Amino acid sequence: MMKTTASLKPAEVEKKWIVIDAQDAVVGRLASFIAMRLRGKHRPDYTPHVDCGDYVVVVNADKVKFTGRKLQNKIYYWHTGHPGGIKERTAEKILGGRFPERVLEKAVERMLPKESPLARKQLTHLRIYNAGEHPHEAQNPETIAFADLNAKNVRSA
């Protein structure tokens, strides 16, 4: 006889820490994988209204790759709030600038539910670092080989 499990309660959630190396990873594929882990959709007991996702640590975020000509053609827009204050910057400028991890951060943020307190909380469980090291060794994170999951996940050039 099969029994349906009740929905997950916040006190019952066991969060894991995972580390992903973003070296030569394709931005969109990596962002969708991270968003799925942050929301907890990889779990069999996923509950939409409960924060049941994992903590995700990304290293080498400045070494991500874009497919096609997105590096030159993808444009990020924002508005200053003043009349005529639309600004733009290409992905190439952001990756070559002061905060290259923002490319991956924005990609993940835009894959989470919009204007949701739960999504904002889940986004705080994402830690992105440009270097190969991270300060979260005390949490005993599990390393996930993102490049080995699918041949299309990485680009060499």
Image (cartoon, rainbow, N blue to C red):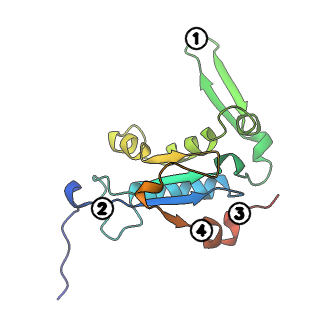
Q: Position of residue 120 (x, y in %)?
A: 39, 40
In this image, 7 relative to 19: left or right?
Answer: left
Q: Is residue 55 above or below residue 114?
A: below
Q: CA distance from mark 3 to mark 2?
A: 30 Å
Q: Quadrant of residue 91?
A: top right
Q: Amino acid at mark 1?
A: His
Quadrant containing the C terminus in the rendered view: bottom right
Q: CA distance from mark 3 to mark 1?
A: 40 Å
Q: Is residue 104 above or below residue 87?
A: below
Residue behind mark 4: 145
In this image, 133 relative to 48: left or right?
Answer: right
Q: Of the two numbered discs 3 and 4 on the same chain, state the one appearing first in sequence.
A: 4
Residue behind mark 2: 14
Total count of labels: 4
Q: Position of residue 38 (x, y in %)?
A: 43, 54
Quadrant containing the N terminus in the rendered view: bottom left
Q: CA distance from mark 3 to mark 4?
A: 11 Å
Q: Position of residue 138 (x, y in %)?
A: 43, 55
Q: Of the two numbered discs 2 and 1 on the same chain, state the one appearing first in sequence.
A: 2
Q: Residues within 10 Å of mark 4 (few under 14, many from 20)?
A: few
Residue behind mark 3: 154
| Residue 82, disc | 1
Look at discs 2 and 1 and give the one toward the viewer.
2
